[in-house]
Image (cartoon, rainbow, N blue to C red):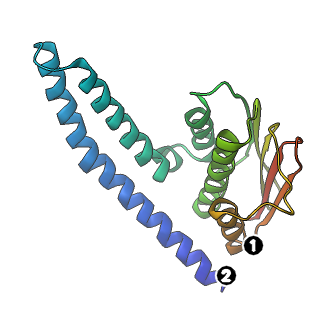
């Protein structure tokens, strides 16, 4: 069952990569061409400038969606750079302070890197959207044959024994279980949230 789960997650990541590439190469390029034509028309005074703003925002949204689905930086520069990029991307438009500390003596294998990236992505998204946090900290370290991720926020927290397990929480747990990783969420109302993952290598 664990092998099957790993294959399913790998297939999902492959599909994400394919869709990301299609968004970038297909829709992204069409929107780029469209914004250039709109800009030319706006410069000539033949178009409402607000339309250009809408088109530019649509292009930016497509590019961000493409990167979040399968960030090339994860493949090109590794887990540390990808996590730093992820924190900037998700938190830059908010007033949330961030802290990122990564201590890796070697790049983890691709499956472990993707696992930690996806769990960090979900934990950060939840913290930004729901926690009303002022500080989010991300720590990654490697000790022997164990890789560890901690995502900690100082937000509103929740009663983990009563909260309904939504798609996000279930996805994190299922991913961790598929790779024999220990996954834990510690939270209480008013006490923030701490998501931790220990991945055997």
Which residue is drawn at the image coordinates 32% and 50% (left, top)?
23
* Disc number placed over residue 180 in the picture, else none: 1
Which residue is drawn at the image coordinates 53% and 48% (left, top)?
74
Counting residues from the N terminus, which is met first, the one under dot 1 or under dot 2?
Answer: 2
Residue 105 is situated, as x and y percent measured from the top left of the image, at 73, 46
Residue 19 is situated, as x and y percent measured from the top left of the image, at 36, 58
Res 185 seen here: yes
Say which quarter of the image contains residue 61.
top left
User: What element does badge 1 sit on?
Assistant: loop
Q: Badge 2, how many Cα within 10 Å: few under 14, some, many 20+?
A: few
Q: CA distance from mark 1 to mark 2?
A: 8 Å
The reply, left or right, for residue 47 in relation to residue 161 is left
Which residue is drawn at the image coordinates 59% and 83% (left, top)?
4
Q: Can you identify the residue that label 2 sits on? A: 2
Decide: is 133 above or below 62.
Answer: above
Residue 37 is situated, as x and y percent measured from the top left of the image, at 14, 28
Decide: is 55 above or below 24.
Answer: above
Viewer-proximal residue among 56 and 118: 56
Decide: is 48 above or below 86.
Answer: above
Viewer-proximal residue among 114 and 86: 86
Which residue is drawn at the image coordinates 66% and 55% (left, top)?
119
The reply, left or right, for residue 69 in relation to residue 106 is left
Viewer-proximal residue among 68 and 153: 153
Q: Are marks 1 and 2 in contact (CB under 8 Å)?
A: yes
User: What element does badge 2 sit on?
Assistant: helix
Q: Badge 1, how many Cα within 10 Å: few under 14, some, many 20+?
A: some
Residue 17 is situated, as x and y percent measured from the top left of the image, at 42, 58
The reply, left or right, for residue 141 in relation to residue 95 is right
């Amino acid at each position: 069952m664990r092998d099957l789960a790993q294959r399913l997650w790998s297939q999902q990541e492959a599909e994400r990569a394919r869709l990301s590439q299609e968004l970038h190469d297909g829709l992204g390029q069409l929107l780029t061409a469209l914004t250039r034509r709109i800009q030319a028309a706006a410069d000539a005074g033949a178009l409402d400038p607000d339309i250009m703003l809408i088109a530019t925002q649509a292009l930016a949204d497509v590019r961000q969606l493409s990167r979040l689905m399968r960030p090339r930086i994860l493949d090109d520069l590794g887990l540390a750079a990808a996590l730093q990029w992820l924190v900037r991307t998700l938190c830059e438009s908010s007033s949330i302070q961030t802290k990122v500390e990564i201590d890796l003596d070697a790049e983890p294998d691709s499956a472990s890197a993707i696992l930690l990236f996806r769990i960090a992505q979900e934990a950060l998204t939840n913290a930004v959207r729901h926690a009303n946090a002022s500080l989010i900290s991300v720590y990654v370290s490697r000790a022997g044959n164990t890789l560890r991720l901690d995502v900690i926020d100082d937000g509103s927290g929740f009663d983990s024994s009563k909260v309904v397990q939504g798609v996000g929480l279930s996805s994190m747990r299922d991913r961790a279980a598929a790779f024999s990783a220990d996954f834990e969420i510690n939270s209480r109302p008013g006490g923030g949230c701490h998501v931790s993952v220990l991945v055997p290598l």
